[in-house]
Image (cartoon, rainbow, N blue to C red):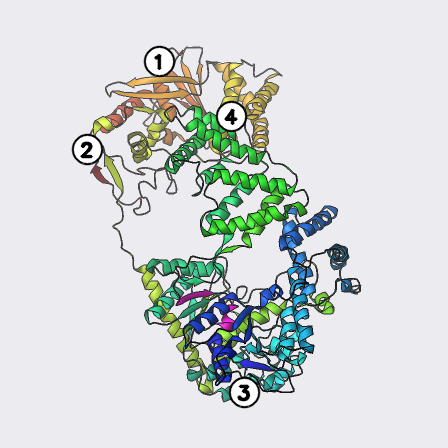
Amino acid sequence: MFDAQPTPRVFALPPGCDYPAELIAGLNERLEGQPPEAWARVEIFVNTSRMRRRLIQLFADGPPRLLPRIRLLTQLAADPELTDLPPAQPPLRRTLELAGLVRRLLEADPSLAPKSALFDLAESLGALFDEMHGEGVAVEALKGLDISDASGHWQRALKFLTIASNVIGTDTMPSAEARLRAAAETLAEPWFHTPPDHPVIVAGSTGSRGPVALLMQAVARLPQGAVILPGVDPHMPRDVWDRMEDDRASEDHPQYRFAKIARALDLDPADLPTWTGCAPVPERAALLSMALRPAPVTDQWMRDGPSLGDMHRATDGLSLIEAADPVEEAAAIALCLRRAIDGGKRAALISPDRMLTRRVQAALDRWGIEADDSAGLPLHLTAPGRLLRQTAALVGALPGPEDVLALLKHPLVAPEGDRNMHLLRARRLDLWLRKNGTPEVGSTVLAAWAEGQTKDDGATEWAAWAGDLIDRLAAIGHGPLDDMAGHHIKATEAFAPALWEEAPGRSAKLAMDGLLAEAAFGDAISPPEYSALVETILTAGEVRRPDTARPDVMIWGTLEARVQGADLVILAGLSEGTWPEPPAPDPWLNREMRHRLGLLLPERRIGLAAHDFQQAACAPEVVFSRARRDAEAETVMSRWLNRLTNLLGGLSDTGGPDALAAMRARGDRWLHQARLAADRVILAEPARRPSPRPPVEARPNRLSVTQIQTLVRDPYAIYAGKVLSLSRLAPLRPEPDALLRGTALHEILERWLREGHDPASPEARPALLRIADEVLALVPWQSARLAWLAHVDGFADWFLEGERQRQAQAVPLEPEKGGRFEVPGSGFTLTGTADRIDRLPDGRLVVIDYKTGALPSKDQLLYFDKQLMLEAVMAEAGAFEGVEPAEVARVSHIGLGSTPKETQHTLREPGDETLDPDAVLAMLQALLMRYRSRERGYTALRAMQSMLDRSDHAHLARFGEWTLDDDAIPEDVG
């Protein structure tokens, strides 16, 4: 197929070509006139499975011809002729073995990294040794590395690497990367002496990996071999090519790898012949070539920029979207893709930002468009992946209520039988746990729940099923990895009998089977370490979507940009930190150490990403897209897009600024459409301030003294709670809030009074603190317990001093007296519990209330805060059990807040504004009678103390659609 030539055979295809189509076109040109079997003798090595599939599809589209042998470079070691190569060591086995070394390193020096980073460090260590094997760097080179001028961290890291290399050297099985290099060397050596008699082509690779570069050099030297490089810049001057000899200065340039492989073959990269005559957008390619020149020669923009010609022609087909945020960016991209497929075009979205691509797919779902996503769905985000992570997190300790409910409500979890009944029980358990809060949930708690489910015959069996599995997971302690993994997987299978069904389940099973197969090579492990390991394994997996995606809408990673073609290409997420991504931190070797060893520099990935950008930006129609702001802060434009816009902005003589403005205008049209779509909502009529009027017979005829204040300030809350029976759900995990604190302090003082201590006695204070210690011992939060105990200790002296004065004037009666009072003439029952009632020597009473919050003023007692005055009314009527009716002389608040304080209010004092129980009773009767009329509505937030106050039912009243200035609209209900 090829004529003989004295130099290695390397061809180039410029950026923007549809690489698979041009590859076949070049083969067709060179095999013209050859017999049909000549096609079958051609052997092609490609770099991705997607490219392999595309080539096969292009051949299937015709004309009829025999299919060449198409092989993957990553499967080079699977060649049936390479029978002498030992099998590769599974990556997980390598990680588990290295994790033992890393664990001992962290135990010796815990300051190096947290224990949670164990497997991440082991993976990065394995990746380092894989890279050394792939690049042909012997592990012995570590021992000869001079780092006397480096910091102590790198010296410790090198010492550890030397120890780890001794362990790696004892492996009888090579790593996958070492085996790939061995396969390349094994193929290349006989080819040198006995070259194959059929054409061998390496297509689509940039040669960035050592084994692949080795094979490419061997193939290029074959008599019938050829290497076809993707995206070689035909517009870069020779002097710029010549500058790319220093990898430390040029590794981040998009064309560096081509210069390197050309030098290895004694070729001049500026003189590489083209495979075909493809030159899709020469003006744009020249513009991008100049924009991406190395930083030291950007002064050439001034010299060579005007020679690029008309910038409107060079930027024809380019659009620039600069969205306000990622949500708007995704919406604009989705509109671009939809318009393209409506026009019969093949469209591709290219971005390394997986969150952005998922947002775009979600936006496409509105129109029933499913894109062909090359990355698939991350395994750990699938239903089986989430369930395996949830159950792994339960290993080693009883879970909290939120973890148990999240597990039981998982879409795959259900015992054999009716899932609807399973969900009903899970929801009943949810409500029960909120009412009977507990920090941990196991079989004992679930059995207690089942005892109350008297109408559900299967509740006991269901609770035993769930509780047994939870206890089994919690009972797993530090131990062998294979045992822990086996118990974990069995328990998860028992939770979800359909766990391994469908594509995500099958992928999850492969991942967990791999763990079981290699678990014997790991050390004993703790439950948190096991959970982190499962997370790491599942995060590395992916699930391909079913074959329901459209073939004309594609979501690609940056790798596909090198060797795929589309009519419309959208380059999204073009912000620094996203595209390009910053180099990953290397905990083992710094940049200089890597250079001395001959390893790849961190800038390698940036250079590959730059090449992907240059290749994709030369498609027939291109949209550059970025968000000006992400979830945290303003973003910075990607360095390549920034170079392009700066170059255009400076070429005023050839229309650069106007061309850039036109690019932005084309992008703004998509943003405008996206904003219109976002604003195109059906505006519902805002709710009016409610004041429902239920039938009189449906209204409550019994309230507590505290609810009377609610009736005054927020009647709607009474309607929602008493008529609709709606109450706020308690949190799943109780917190030490103000309500619990107040309840505890009330109980402490109640017990102290019941025990009859003399406040003047030296034993009074120790008794108070003893009672506080006993009461607070039941509080499950240690920090709150200690803080509240210190608070009691702080106000103890003040309280005892006041108690001496109070008991000198009156005798305390039994505390916490409950009572009920039939309000005369209303048919209404008032209930309440008095914190404390004292009797004066003259027989009159003093009603006392303990407060842990702010104390109400006299005006508040007069008009809003009626609790204490209503208790006075009840006391005078003899409504409290065991308290003879008598006149109430005064009411008092004892404040137990941060600043202890007591306020006393004498009743029936002469004056206009007096606290009179008789007047309060009359007010209560009038208030209750008003609500016994159908004409009276329960107005929402009628008289709140503060504009910021909200009730538990404000959302039900749809507050926010109306304001406190709006009039209430009475409405008959029921």
* Prevalent SS, magenta region: loop
Which three-letter amino acid code belongs to the residue tagged 4? Leu
Residue where numbered disc 2 is placed:
935
Query: Which comes sooner in the sequence, label 2 or label 4?
Result: 4
Neighbour tally class for label 3: few under 14, some 14-19, many 20 plus, Cα within 10 Å = few
Residue where numbered disc 1 is placed:
878
Neighbour tally class for label 2: few under 14, some 14-19, many 20 plus, Cα within 10 Å = some
Of tags 1 and 2, which is closer to the observer? 2
What is the C-alpha distance between the residues marked 3 and 2?
86 Å
Location of the C terminus (image quadrant): top left
Of tags 1 and 4, which is closer to the observer? 4
In this rendering, the count of numbered labels is: 4
Neighbour tally class for label 1: few under 14, some 14-19, many 20 plus, Cα within 10 Å = some
In the image, 779 versus 183, the foreground residue is 183
Of tags 1 and 3, which is closer to the observer? 3
Q: Give the magenta part as a residue range.
A: 545-564
What is the C-alpha distance between the residues marked 1 and 4?
27 Å
Of tags 4 and 3, which is closer to the observer? 3
What is the C-alpha distance between the residues marked 1 and 2?
34 Å
